[in-house]
Amino acid sequence: MNGLFILCLLLALMGARPSFAADRAAQAGMIYGYSVPDAQNTNPFILYGVKGSAFLTPNFSTGGYFLVSDKQGAPSATDKFRYSVAGVHATAHIPSGKGDTFVGLRVGITKVNRNPNGIDSTFSPYHYGIGTGYDYHVTPYLSVGFEGSYLHVQPGKTTQNGNTIQMDSFNIMSFMIAVQFML
């Protein structure tokens, strides 16, 4: 897991240099949609944030993302559950006509706010997964698209008042739309 994280981080850092892509160098934008954190918690959460990519070749990009969930999907007022994910991605692109189909790997860190035993706690486990979607190029500088992703969040633990509290692993399945500016 740590090796994969370091590899994706290095690929993302390489994306900071000028691109080889003839048609675009980078893209960045906003993303919004729904997610379901696990089969045990089927309440939908609204998930929103930002993402960006730098193209290393016309068919490969690296970049990052930061997404935050709302509180509406929490099981109850006494069983809090809210999360955010931040990480890097390495993505393959298949250009076609006015659009771009993509599939990529994602890895990063998750912040989960829960209240086991009635005490608010924050866990910080790693996550990894895949994402795929389609971007439609409305103009040479603007795209609108959709994407779906599956992330696996590893088990987490934290300490409260000298006691270690464990958090089980869970999965995040999300379906979102994106508006991105292309450079």
Image (tube, rainbow, N blue to C red):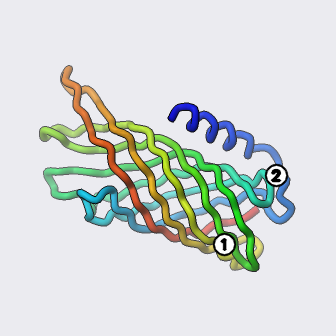
Q: Amino acid at mark 2?
A: Ser
Q: Position of residue 85 (x, y in %)?
A: 45, 48
**Marks 1 and 2 in Cβ contact (< 8 Å):** no
Q: Residue 136 appears at what percent x and percent y?
A: 66, 76
Between disc 1 and disc 2, whose residue precedes? Answer: 2
Q: Which residue is mark 2?
A: 19
* Quadrant into which the C terminus falls: bottom right
Q: Position of residue 77 (x, y in %)?
A: 16, 55
Task: Answer few, some or many: residues within 10 Å of disc 2's Cα (few below 14, many 20 plus, some between 14 and 19).
Answer: some
Q: Is residue 19 above or below residue 139?
A: above
Q: Residue 162 occupies which quadrant of the picture?
A: top left
The image quarter containing residue 8 is: top right
Residue type, label 1: Ser
Q: Residue at (56%, 63%) from the top-left corner?
A: 132
Q: Residue at x 83, y 65 (%)?
A: 23
Label number found at residue 67: none
Residue 113: percent from left, percent from top: 29, 44
Can you say whether 164 is above or below 140 in the image?
above
Looking at the rendered structure, the secondary structure element under dot 2 is loop
Neighbor class of circle 1 (other Cα within 10 Å; few <14, some 14-19, many 20+) is many
Q: Residue at x 37, y 57 (%)?
A: 69
Q: Look at 33% across and 56% down and name the residue there.
A: 37
Residue that numbered label 1 is attached to: 143
Secondary structure of the residue carrying numbered label 1: strand
Relative depth, front residue between 94 and 69: 94
